[in-house]
Amino acid sequence: MEFLRPATWDEALAVKAEYPTALPISGGTDVMVEMNFDVHRPSAILDLNRITELSQWEITGDVVKLGASVPYSRIIDELSGPLPGLALAAHTVGSPQIRNRGGVGGNLGAASPAGDSHPALLAAGRDVFVEVASVRGTRMIAIDDFYVGVKRNSMEQDELIRAVHIPVADGPQQFSKIGTRNAMVIAVCAFGFALHPKNGTVGTGIGSAAPTPRRAVEAEEYLQGVLAERGLWESGDLLGTEVIQKFGELVKAAASPIDDVRGTADYRRHALAVMARRTLTWTWNDYSKQIRSAA
Ligand SMILES: Cc1cc2nc3c(=O)[nH]c(=O)nc-3n(C[C@H](O)[C@H](O)[C@H](O)COP(=O)(O)OP(=O)(O)OC[C@H]3O[C@@H](n4cnc5c(N)ncnc54)[C@H](O)[C@@H]3O)c2cc1C
């Protein structure tokens, strides 16, 4: 097995072009597990750890450019203000050791329906883009177009993930995950939710309850309609229980889970409705408080 260690981004793209089947490795928290279990044995490994820009983030205007290899622990410590939903999701990943190594680029590369960053990225809105590149050029893939199947994403074989571009939160965000215990657990199912008062939208993300991470489109449209028609963005008045209930039912309906070792499809649907109701209530309470304290 060849071990390729480019020092710069351009070198990495050139190496990937020359060895398209080389398996990129960042934190290695997915790659090494699969190799240890002999899931696959690549002919070459492309180590991205010398490329410092992949471990950096910056904010330009109202967008965070998050390097593919910024570990979860730094997202929690440094980005919980601009990216509260993603930071909450990062809190639930693995253990401190895993959070010190693993990052969003690896989660996107693996594209598991159970990956915890996906619901948070979807909920962050339709203006989230995955920046991928090859020697042929750079593409910005909208997060909604990124997940194409179970553990499959829309990248070409010669492409690498450079960064994820995520709008700075303009309202409260939440993430909720159900597992068989509180830590070191793959999600039975998960839900991300965000309020976007600036453009009057809401964002949702369902994890581990469909072949790919997905948003609950009808639930988003329903809630956006209610918030606009009743002037709730301006007033911050409490949502009625019927609105919260209906939102939960629409999120549940958007899932298409399966029975597996971690949980049944019925349980996942039920849990999603509960998480949707809770995250909506939490975020809306926070939003109402902000509106009232500003008045
Ligand atoms: C004990 C344990 C607990 C875990 N718990 C969780 C959990 O709770 N939630 C969760 O979501 N995940 C969990 N994971 C999985 C893993 O930690 C995450 O998916 C993590 O985000 C992977 O990041 P990484 O940098 O380690 O990726 P790596 O293992 O380095 O790579 C993962 C995949 O992405 C590809 N890749 C990496 N970087 C790039 C790049 N820049 N461009 C293109 N492709 C790239 C790799 O080729 C590989 O296919 C756990 C893993 C372990 C071992």
Image (cartoon, rainbow, N blue to C red):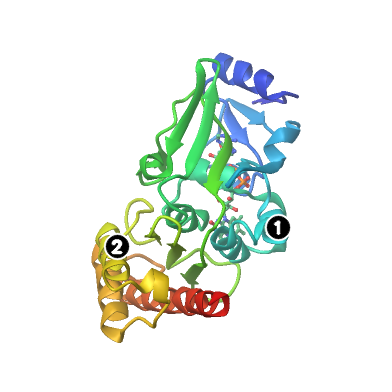
Whether residue 241 is visible, yes or no, is yes
Q: Residue furthest front?
A: 295
In the picture provided, is 254 more to the left or to the right than 40? left
Q: Residues within 10 Å of mark 2 (few under 14, many from 20)?
A: many
Report whether the residue tagged 1 is closer than 8 Å to ligand 1: no
SS assignment at label 2: loop
Residue situated in front as seen by the camera: 27 or 176 = 176
Q: Residues within 10 Å of mark 1 (few under 14, many from 20)?
A: many
Q: In the image, is residue 85 above or below residue 141? A: below
Q: In the image, is residue 282 above or below residue 73? A: below
Question: Where is residue 74 shown, x and y percent of the image?
Answer: 71, 54
Question: Where is residue 140 shown, x and y percent of the image?
Answer: 47, 32
Q: Amino acid at mark 2?
A: Pro
Picture quadrant where residue 134 is located: top right
Q: Which residue shows up at 53% across the image and 59% down it? A: 170
Circle 1 sits on which residue?
73
Q: Quadrant of the N terminus?
A: top right
Circle 2 sits on which residue?
257
Q: Amino acid at mark 1?
A: Ser
Picture quadrant where residue 9 is located: top right
Q: CA distance from mark 1 to mark 2?
A: 30 Å
Residue 149: numbered disc: none
Q: Which residue shows up at 44% across the image and 65% down it? A: 193
Q: In the image, is residue 109 above or below residue 121? A: above
Question: Where is residue 178 shown, x and y percent of the image?
Answer: 46, 73
Whether residue 39 is visible, yes or no, is no
Circle 1/circle 2 CB separation < 8 Å? no
SS assignment at label 1: helix
